[in-house]
Image (cartoon, helix red, strand yellow):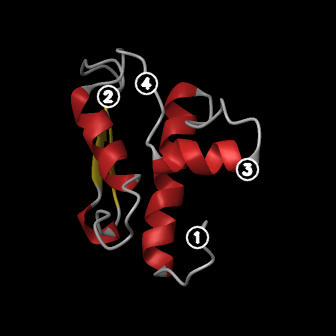
Amino acid sequence: MLEGQFHDPLAVDVWSLGIILVEVLLQYHPFKMAKSMVDLALLIINRRTCYPRKISRETLNIIDLMLTIDPDERIKIELVEINISPLGNNCGRSRLRFD
């Protein structure tokens, strides 16, 4: 999208859902440190973002798959299944599935 090229709309939706997932879990945007559009592009391209240790490994893995830069390599919407347990415990575990 940053390059002005056409992208598969479903791949863009997966990226957007990944951003929303981060915002819901952490209450901040994953690229919040960007001061300009150039900064934002560089953060995305260089994959510069940090997540707190309280996020479970499983959740981080799905976020990473959803925020893969190359849309052809990004996880497909049909394969996204998220067991959300940001604190790594079973309390309040939610299950999201996109079919």
> Could you tell which of marks 1 and 2 lies nearer the N-terminus?
1
For discs 4 and 2, the disc positioned in front in the rendered view: 4
Q: How far apart in space, not on screen, are marks 4 and 3 (Cα)?
A: 21 Å
Q: Residue at x 44, y 63 (%)?
A: 14
Identity of the residue drawn at 29% across and 63% down: 75
Q: Are marks 2 and 3 in contact (CB under 8 Å)?
A: no
Q: Which residue is mark 4?
A: 51
Q: Quadrant of residue 88?
A: top left
Amino acid type, mark 3 = Met
Separation of residues labelled 2 and 3 (CA atoms): 32 Å
Looking at the image, can residue 99 be seen?
no
| Residue 61 in sight here | yes
48 with respect to 36 (left or right)? left
Labelled disc at residue 1 = 1
Marks 1 and 2: CB-CB under 8 Å?
no
Q: Earlier in the sequence, mark 4 or mark 3?
A: 3
For badge 4, the amino acid type reads Tyr
Q: Residues within 10 Å of mark 3 (few under 14, many from 20)?
A: few
Return the x and y of residue 11 as percentages of the image width and height.
Answer: 43, 71
Question: Residue 85 got which mark?
Answer: 2
Residue 54 vs residue 96, the one in the foreground: 54
Q: Label 4 crowding class (10 Å Cα cut-off): few <14, some 14-19, many 20+? A: few
Q: For mark 2, give the secondary structure.
A: loop
For marks 4 and 1, give the one nearer the viewer.
1
Element under label 1? Answer: loop
The image shows residue 66, relative to residue 43, as above or below, that is: below
Residue name at image x 70 percent, y 49 percent? 38
Q: Is residue 94 above or below residue 41?
A: above
Label at residue 37:
3
Q: Secondary structure at mark 4?
A: loop
Mark before the other along the chain sequence, 3 or 1: 1
The amino acid marked with disc number 2 is Ser
